[in-house]
Image (tube, grey):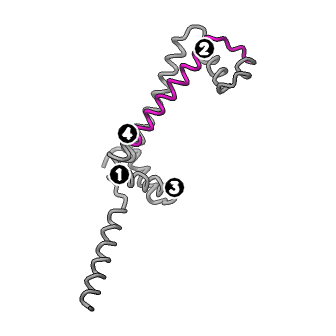
Amino acid sequence: MKKLFFTMLITVAFASFLQAQDNEITDDDLRKYAILNQAIEYMKKDISIEVNKMIKAQEGITGKRYKELASAKGDEAKLAELGATEPEKKFLELINKFKADRLEAIKRVNSDLATKMVGNGGKTYKAIKAALKTDADLQARYQAILAQVAGKEEVQ
C-alpha cells in the first residue's frame, strides 16, 4: 500500500512538474506572439493606407470632407446636417464595407495564427495575453522581443 501511495505521489508530482513546464512562457512563445501582433498592426495600417487611396481617387471628396462625413457615424440626421449628397453617402457605405471586410479578415488571420503559430490550440496566446496585463517581468521580456521583431533593436 505504501509503495502504491508513493508511486502515485511521484506520478502526481511529475505530472505537476510537466504541467508547470507547459505553462511556462518561453522567449520563443513571446517572439511568435510579437510577430503575430506586428503582422496584425501592419494589416491595420494597410486599411488606413487603402482608405486614403480611395479618398484621393474619389472625385469631389477630400480628406477633410471624408472626416467630416465619417464623424456622423452613419447617423442620417447628422449626415443631413452636414449636407451629405447621395454620392457621398454611397462612398461612405463603400468605405465602411471595405473597412468591415478587412477587419473581419484580420480577425480570422489573428485567430488562425494564435491557434496555429503561437500554438497549443490558442492556449499559449491567451496565456501570454493575460499574463502581459499583470506580469512586469514578462512585459519587459516581451517589449525587448517586440523591439527586435519590429527592427528597433539588434538581435543578440
Q: Is residue 97 magenta?
A: yes
Question: Marks 3 and 1, Cα distance to the nearest angstrom?
Answer: 21 Å
Residue that carries the numbered disc 4 in the rendered image: 151
Question: Marks 4 and 2, Cα distance to the nearest angstrom?
Answer: 34 Å
Q: Is residue 115 above or below residue 134?
A: above
Inspect the image, locate mark 3, and give the three-letter code of the amino acid beneath it: Lys
Q: Is residue 82 above or below residue 100?
A: above
Inspect the image, locate mark 4, and give the three-letter code of the amino acid beneath it: Gly
Question: Closer to the N terminus: mark 2 or mark 1?
Answer: 2
Question: Closer to the N terminus: mark 4 or mark 3?
Answer: 3
- Highlighted magenta segment, given as a residue range: 82-111
Inspect the image, locate mark 2, and give the three-letter code of the amino acid beneath it: Thr
Inspect the image, locate mark 1, and give the three-letter code of the amino acid beneath it: Gly
Identify the element where label 4 is drawn.
loop
Depth-wise, is mark 4 or mark 1 nearer the camera?
A: 1
Residue that carries the numbered disc 1 in the rendered image: 121
Identify the element where label 2 is drawn.
loop
